[in-house]
Image (cartoon, rainbow, N blue to C red):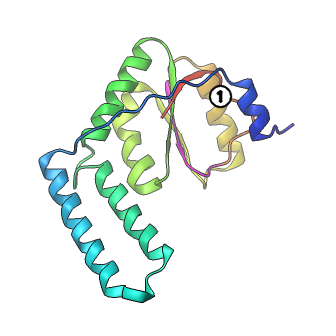
Amino acid sequence: MRRTKREMAKAMPPQIRQELWLDLQDRQMKVYEKALEEERNRLVKLGGAITRTHVMSAVERLKRVSNFAPELLDGVKVRALVDLVDEVSSAGSKIVVITQFKEDGLEKLLPVLEAYGALSIDRTTSQEQRDEILSAFRQQVHWNVLLIEAGSQLDGKALKEATYVV
């Protein structure tokens, strides 16, 4: 039986929201500033033909650039996530990490978090695979991290085993 989002939310413990503000390092900031300038110029050239889609495309590019240092599986956000995952898994807890990007998110984070027992689900994961992954995450202590691409289907059950969601 599938439960609604509202039913799943009621089954979860109270949420505590924690924000972490990070400054990009010099190399990553330079790449970000260059991408920002390019996107501004592109949008200016569109003039009156600019649409919401153009703006959202620019924002998406800037999000991708701010996630990872160029050509590296590194960056200030990645290091902060690794520190959190290390702390959570050392305490015997589990964490779910949701990313809106597959190639520039999930696929880059998986090798970085493998040492902590990471599993992943994306939009193309079959129902059978999802069920196996979710079962393993819920039942086996050595799987501490579940990476999920935003928009992926799960199994309708709350992930009570995870004490953190990022």
* Residue at figure coordinates x 71%, y 31% from the top left: 9
Quick one: 41 or 122, which is closer to the camera?
41
Q: Which residues are magenta?
A: 142-152
Label 1, on which residue?
159
Q: Quadrant of residue 133?
A: top right
Element marked by disc 1? loop
Residue 136 percent across, percent down from the top left? 61, 27
Q: How many marks?
A: 1
Q: Note whether 128 is above or below 10 in the view shown.
A: below
Q: Position of residue 53 (x, y in %)?
A: 49, 74
Q: Which residue corresponds to the image point at 32% horizontal and 49% vertical from the top-left?
A: 67
Does the magenta segment cover residue 118?
A: no
Q: Is residue 69 left or right of residue 154?
A: left
Q: Residue furthest right?
A: 1
Image location of residue 37, percent across then percent down: 22, 70
Seen at 36% across and 21% down, the residue is 86
Find out whether residue 146 is within the magenta segment: yes
- Please identify the quadrant where the N terminus is shown: top right
Q: In the picture, residue 83 is in which quadrant?
A: top left
Does residue 143 appear in the picture of this structure? no
> What amino acid is labelled 1 in the image?
Leu
Q: Nearer the viewer, residue 155 or 57?
A: 57
Relative placement, left or right, of 164 versus 155 is: left
The furthest residue to the left = 26
Q: Looking at the picture, tell me which residue is in the foreground, 85 or 165.
A: 165
Q: Position of residue 72 (x, y in %)?
A: 23, 49
